[in-house]
């Protein structure tokens, strides 16, 4: 199969028709190539025949490269011939072998084959390296190999004098060691034998003494077994063979211990896995008394079973506690409640105790369940009417984007501080703490960068949210990370935004490097994800002494790339400011150098944003931003922004892709409890009746009657930021990101009209709009017109709309 193209057969028929109807020029070219290939195949040595379909398939794979197609078909045919011959050879061994030269070998590297770079790259003409510059990829190992300590092996097989001397000395030493070992073994065995006899005698005396009813006799079978086990136990020490023999003598006609345990050659070796646990202590034996004789402790040891203490209790030595019966507490509680005239819900001891059937156990387990029964009342509100009646302000989410260290978090910290959304004491506290670790200039940024890692590193890692209100609007800030490593988090933030604040570092050199970096990438991503309005905060103007020229230069360059990215000029505005000093953020600048700017401050610019419309009446769609524990009362909560539809307390929701259902126990809108929520609002849903394993950020919440479908492949219209070809990519949609690949390049589209400009392109160049097919590794909840971003090798390569 070709590595260039993978056929996806699951796509719309009309789409496929469109795809397959090549234009006349291409058809003509294909015909010419087909003829040429057929001609070359027939003319070549040996002559090969192939069908037109095969030829055209090969041409398609090799992008009309005649030579490669001929080579491929020859190789293919040769392989088929080879296979046939191999089969006929096995069935009729006498069949005449085809001369090797008549088969054109196809390249099939095997690990055992000698690797030839020339052969491997034989069909790659651009690798035609001049002969004098060629070199071997594999370096042959050096022969003859050296010996372990260096030096070549003896050519005649004889040892050198020195080697022979060393070998003789080694042998002598080995023999000496062996002799010493045998002596030591004998001495140890003698000592062990004496100790064991003594131990055996004392054990027997002890047993006789411990016998409660006097029935245990030394010669009795059970005592014998016990003794045998003792023997085995002793034998588990070193060199037990002699000891065991001794015990077998004592045990008389009992089966020999050696049958079970065979210590051999002075080493511990058993035919079965040996239980290394110690015997019951003297105290335990005293407690258990005569039960010791009839329980299976000894046998269990011999047969490798465990010593089961419960068995001892099972012998009727103690009264087992009936756990099914009422506990002493239950009895007291029951007595108390009956004294108050209440009927106990506890089963009577008889009821509970005597049944013991499996059904009873099951119902018992049920009653023990920790889960609370879900009893949430739905108020059956008409949510849209409630929303229209409500005094909700205009609400807007904006994402703060820009190159790393442009001053995004500081600017937002300043905005919140000057609007008294954060009190001065907190800011002072942050300033002291930041100074302690030598990052005093980041104090304002700490209002948003809350994690210890972000503070220590001085970079934003994940989206930070915060809120503030003006007279007209309730704003939610989504502070995005500027570092290129965290672009996926920036995408997640942008997917929830109505408009963007692009922060640019005006200081010398930083604007220019930002333009090459994330300033441009973020702006492009924002536009591709549907954001239409952008406020450009030209920050750090204090570093360039509020130079008007610098501002004009930045304004001119930035607006030209923003318009190229698709923002309408009327939706772009610029504010020169200084986040650290607070100039033109909430209050106008006091700096005399800034007097040339009479325009709006940043907050005034934000206020100009028109109310954003949302699809309130469409089926519910909410992408989970976070899953967390909302407190003791709410063990499982999720947060996110409702993209479409509405919901209310008591609603049953469906979570995709898992397909699990849950109940909305209660909810919060912008941090305040409410009975309902609509599209465009940021909500926290406290859920009941669901296992947390079904909830992940990026999952989509919908209603069971209008579910979102899981999809594994989709067709999308994208704007390419880089070259696109069939390749591995990461697909991002809000918080969701999943690996996949571009499986087909369908067409290049006209940017203005969207009409097909070229079918089946081999590659898509940057700046082109194209229709492509993307396949994902696992099904995810996606539906048109979702906005997706494709990334590869840490960069954004395309963004677009699902068709
Ligand atoms: N001189 C000057 N420095 C500023 C200004 N705004 C921010 N800075 C400094 O720029 C540095 C980076 O500020 P941050 O707010 O962390 O930048 P950021 O864009 O949020 O950084 P990331 O989120 O990590 O991309 C800090 O040292 C700030 O003190 C400003 O207006 N003037």
Image: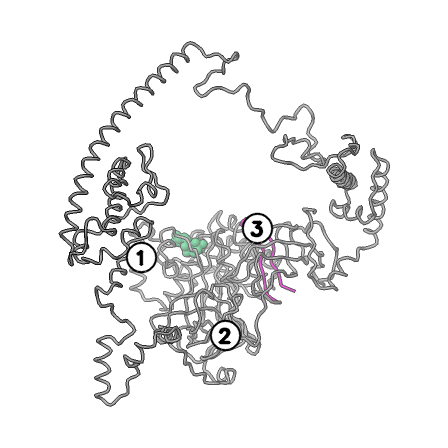
Magenta part of the chain: 785-803
**Residue 680, horizontal then vertical, whole percent:** 51, 73
Gap in angstroms between the C-alphas marked 3 and 2: 34 Å
Which residue does the numbered mark 1 point to in the structure image? 431
| View extreme (bottom): residue | 341
Circle nearer the viewer, 2 or 1: 2
The overriding secondary structure of the stretch rendered in magenta is strand
Q: CA distance from mark 2 to mark 1?
A: 45 Å
Determine whether the residue tagged by mark 2 lies in a helix, strand or loop.
Answer: strand
In this rendering, the answer to whether 146 lies above or below 352 is: above
Give the quadrant of ligand 1: bottom left
Query: Hey, which quadrant is residue 269 in on the image?
Result: top left
Is 374 displayed left or right of 557 in the figure?
Answer: left
Q: Nearer the viewer, residue 236 or 574?
A: 236
List x then y, in percent, for residue 484.
Answer: 49, 51
Q: Which residue is mark 2?
A: 653
In primary-sequence order, the first of circles 2 and 1 is 1
Tag 2: Cα neighbours inside 10 Å, few (<14), some, or many (≥20)? many
The C terminus is located in which quarter? Answer: bottom right
How packed mark 1 is, by other alpha carbons closer than 10 Å (few <14, some 14-19, many 20 or more), is some
Residue 154: say if magenta. Answer: no
* Mark number displayed over residue 792: 3
Q: Earlier in the sequence, mark 1 or mark 3?
A: 1
- Dot 3 or dot 2: first in sequence order is 2
Callouts 3 and 2 close, C-beta under 8 Å:
no
Q: Secondary structure at mark 1?
A: helix
User: Which of the 4 image quarters holds residue 413?
Assistant: bottom left
């Amino acid at each position: 199969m070709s590595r260039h193209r993978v056929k996806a057969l699951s796509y719309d028929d009309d789409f496929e028709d469109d795809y397959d109807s090549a234009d006349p020029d291409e058809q003509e070219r294909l015909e010419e190539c087909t003829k040429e290939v057929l001609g070359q195949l027939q003319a070549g040595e040996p002559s090969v025949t192939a069908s037109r379909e095969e030829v055209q398939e090969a041409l398609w794979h090799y992008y009309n490269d005649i030579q490669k197609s001929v080579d491929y078909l020859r190789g293919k045919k040769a392989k088929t011939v080879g296979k046939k011959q191999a089969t006929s050879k096995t069935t009729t061994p006498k069949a005449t072998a085809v001369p090797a030269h008549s088969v054109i070998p196809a390249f099939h590297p095997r690990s055992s084959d000698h690797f030839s770079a020339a052969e491997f790259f034989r069909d790659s003409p651009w690798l035609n390296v001049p002969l004098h510059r060629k070199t071997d990829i594999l370096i042959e190992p050096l022969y003859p190999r050296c010996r372990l300590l260096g030096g070549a092996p003896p050519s005649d097989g004889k040892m050198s004098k020195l080697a022979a001397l060393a070998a003789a000395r080694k042998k002598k030493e080995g023999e000496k060691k062996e002799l010493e070992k045998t002596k030591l073994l004998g001495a140890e065995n003698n000592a062990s034998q004496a100790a064991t006899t003594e131990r055996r005698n004392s054990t027997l005396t002890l047993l006789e003494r411990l016998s409660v009813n006097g029935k245990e006799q030394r010669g009795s079978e059970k005592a014998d077994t016990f003794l045998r086990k003792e023997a085995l136990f002793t034998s588990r020490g070193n060199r037990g063979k002699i000891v065991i023999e001794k015990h077998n003598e004592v045990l008389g006609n009992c089966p020999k211990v050696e049958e079970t345990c065979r210590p051999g050659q002075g080493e511990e070796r058993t035919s079965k896995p040996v239980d290394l646990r110690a015997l019951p202590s003297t105290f335990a034996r005293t407690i258990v008394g005569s039960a010791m004789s009839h329980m299976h402790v000894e046998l269990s040891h011999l047969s490798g079973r465990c010593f089961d203490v419960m068995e001892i209790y099972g012998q009727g030595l103690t009264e087992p506690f009936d756990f099914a019966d009422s506990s002493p507490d239950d009895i007291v509680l029951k007595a108390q409640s009956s004294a108050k005239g209440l009927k106990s819900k506890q089963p009577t001891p008889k009821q509970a105790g005597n049944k013991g059937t499996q059904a009873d156990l099951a119902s018992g387990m049920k009653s023990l369940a920790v889960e609370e029964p879900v009893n949430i009342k739905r108020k059956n509100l008409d949510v849209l009417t409630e929303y229209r009646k409500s005094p909700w302000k205009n609400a807007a989410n904006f994402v703060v984007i820009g190159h790393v260290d442009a001053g995004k978090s500081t600017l937002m910290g300043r905005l919140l501080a000057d609007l008294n959304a954060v009190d001065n004491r907190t800011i002072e506290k942050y300033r002291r703490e930041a100074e302690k670790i030598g990052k005093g200039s980041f104090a304002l940024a700490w209002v948003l960068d809350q994690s210890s890692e972000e503070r220590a590193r001085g970079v934003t890692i994940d989206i930070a949210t915060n809120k503030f209100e003006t007279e007209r609007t309730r704003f939610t800030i989504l502070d995005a990370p500027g570092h290129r490593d965290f672009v996926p988090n920036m995408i997640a933030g942008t997917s929830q935004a109505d408009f963007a604040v692009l922060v640019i570092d005006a200081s010398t050199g930083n604007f220019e490097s930002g333009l090459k970096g994330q300033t441009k990438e973020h702006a492009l991503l924002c536009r591709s994800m549907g954001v239409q309005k952008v406020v450009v905060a030209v920050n750090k103007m204090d570093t360039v002494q509020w130079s008007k020229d610098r501002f004009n230069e930045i304004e001119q360059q930035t607006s030209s790339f923003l318009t190229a990215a698709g923002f309408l000029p009327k939706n772009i505005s610029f504010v020169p400011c200084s986040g650290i000093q607070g100039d033109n953020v909430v209050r106008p600048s006091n700096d005399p150098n800034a007097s040339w700017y009479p325009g709006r401050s940043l907050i005034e610019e934000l206020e100009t944003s028109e109310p954003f419309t949302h699809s309130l009446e469409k089926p519910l769609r909410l992408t989970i931003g976070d899953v967390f524990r909302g407190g003791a009362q709410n063990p499982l909560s999720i947060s996110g922004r409702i993209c479409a539809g509405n919901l209310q307390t008591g609603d049953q929701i469906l979570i995709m892709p898992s397909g699990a259902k849950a109940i909305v126990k209660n909810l919060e809108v912008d941090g305040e409890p409410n009975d309902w929520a609509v599209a465009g609002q940021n909500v926290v849903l406290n859920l009941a009746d669901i296992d947390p394993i079904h909830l992940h950020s990026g999952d989509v919440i919908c209603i069971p009657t209008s579910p979102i479908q899981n999809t594994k492949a989709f067709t999308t219209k994208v704007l390419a930021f880089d070259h696109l070809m069939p390749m591995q990519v990461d697909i991002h949609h809000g918080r969701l990101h999943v690996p996949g690949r571009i499986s087909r390049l369908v067409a290049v589209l006209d940017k203005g009209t969207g009409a097909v400009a070229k079918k089946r392109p081999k590659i898509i160049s940057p700046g082109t709009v194209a229709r492509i097919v993307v396949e994902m590794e696992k099904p995810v909840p996606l539906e048109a017109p979702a906005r997706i971003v494709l990334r590869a090798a840490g960069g954004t390569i395309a963004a677009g709309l699902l068709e």
